[in-house]
Image (cartoon, helix red, strand yellow):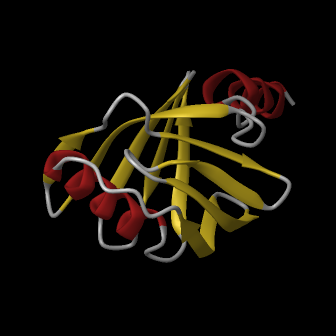
Amino acid sequence: MMLTVAAALCTVACDGPRPPVTGIDWTVDSVTVGGTTHRAPAQAHVKIEDGRAVGNLGCNQFGATARITDDHIRLSHARTTRMACDNARMSFERALARTLTAGPLTMRTEGEKLTLTAAGGDRVQLSRK
């Protein structure tokens, strides 16, 4: 009985309930592609809510369908504006867009941080605004 109570307490205290990822404005901190990490432009952000993801990829605004299943999210049917920015921002934007739409992404929260990881290991780091 004591072991069962201790295990239950550890489940709450050690892992805790998963913080929500929807309804939160997330600032994109970086994207890591092929082992190289690229810092995000200041305006890059994402919000996931009501089956949609919207935000800014670094230059252009985007919208996509978002489906969350357990600890995975899949963004599909992405649409973006078509503004041109400097090469650094456009390069970051292409890497971020490819990673976000690479298929199901594993979601992992830690405090005020969210990491989205693709099957190949590329990942997006976000933090709560």
Q: Would you identify the image quadrant in which residue 75 lies? A: bottom right
- Which residue, as the protein is rendered here, is positioned at the far front? 83
Q: Depth check: 6 or 13 in front?
A: 13
The residue that appears at 83% across and 27% down in the rendered structure is: 5
Q: Depth check: 73 or 7 in front?
A: 73
Quick check: can you spot residue 50?
yes
Q: Depth check: 55 or 67 in front?
A: 55
Quick check: can you spot residue 122?
no
Name the quarter where the C terminus is drawn. top right
**Residue 66: horizontal and vertical position, in percent?**
70, 65
Name the quarter where the N terminus is drawn. top right
Q: In this view, does 123 lie above or below 16?
A: below
Q: In this view, does 35 lie above or below 69?
A: above
The residue that appears at 43% across and 50% down in the rendered structure is: 57
Q: Is residue 46 left or right of residue 21?
A: left
Q: Depth check: 89 or 71 in front?
A: 89
Q: In this view, does 126 lie to the left or right of 75?
A: left
Number of numbered discs on residues: 0
**Residue 52: horizontal and vertical position, in percent?**
75, 59
**Residue 67: horizontal and vertical position, in percent?**
73, 68
The residue that appears at 69% across and 26% down in the rendered structure is: 10
Q: Is residue 99 above or below residue 41?
A: below
**Residue 92: horizontal and vertical position, in percent?**
25, 52
